[in-house]
Image: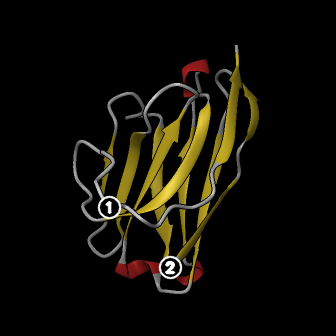
Amino acid sequence: VQLQASGGGLVQAGGSLRLSCAASGAAFANYLIGWYRQTPGKEREGVSCINSSSGDTYYADSVKGRFTISGDNAKNTVYLQMNSLEPEDTAVYYCAVVPVCTYPVVVYYGMNYWGKGTQVTVSS
């Protein structure tokens, strides 16, 4: 399966963006999909994940109540709606196939399917 993240950009604090993660090569409904982000000099951190079969979703504490993950099986796409953005949300955002979708959302050893990241910049 190949993943492609898009939708990043520059937005003012308090604004919104919607990221998309398009999957090809396989039906993404068969996979667990996670969103991650990374800033220079820091480790990649989990943001959210979704089990499209069960509808279960999980979020990092830092984004809970502001971000919403959803999936469209017909479009083979997972979305991350980001509202009330803060400068601390500035990062490169990646989507990935995850072996487990639960709380907390973490990077697991052996995760091999990552989309190319998309830059999100939130100005104060």
The residue pinned by badge 2 equals 1
Q: Identify the element where label 2 is drawn.
A: loop
Expressed as whole percent of the image width and height from the top left, the position of residue 118 reads 67, 48
Q: Is residue 17 left or right of residue 77?
A: right
Q: Exactly how many numbered labels are in the figure?
A: 2
Which image quarter is the C terminus in?
A: top right
Residue at 36% across, 75% down: 31
Q: In the depicted view, which residue is nearer to us: 75 or 111?
A: 111
Q: Identify the element where label 1 is drawn.
A: loop
Q: Residue furthest bottom?
A: 26
Residue at 48% across, 67% down: 71
- Specify the amino acid type for callout 1: Gly
Expressed as whole percent of the image width and height from the top left, the position of residue 67 reads 48, 40
Snapshot quadrant of residue 49: bottom left
Expressed as whole percent of the image width and height from the top left, the position of residue 50 reads 36, 60
The residue pinned by badge 1 equals 110
Q: Residue furthest top?
A: 124
- Specify the amino acid type for callout 2: Val
Snapshot quadrant of residue 45: top left
Expressed as whole percent of the image width and height from the top left, the position of residue 61 reads 32, 30
* Vertical relation: 104 (above or below) 49: above
Number of residues whose C-alpha sits closer than 10 Å to that of mark 2, classed few (under 14), some (14–19) or many (20 or more): some
- Do the numbered discs 2 and 1 sit on residues whose CB atoms are within 8 Å? no
Q: In the depicted view, which residue is nearer to us: 50 or 25?
A: 25
Of badges 2 and 1, the one in the foreground is 1
Which of marks 1 and 2 precedes in the sequence?
2
Q: In the depicted view, which residue is nearer to us: 124 or 91?
A: 91
Residue 100 numbered tag:
none
Q: Is residue 69 left or right of residue 53?
A: right
Number of residues whose C-alpha sits closer than 10 Å to that of mark 1, classed few (under 14), some (14–19) or many (20 or more): few
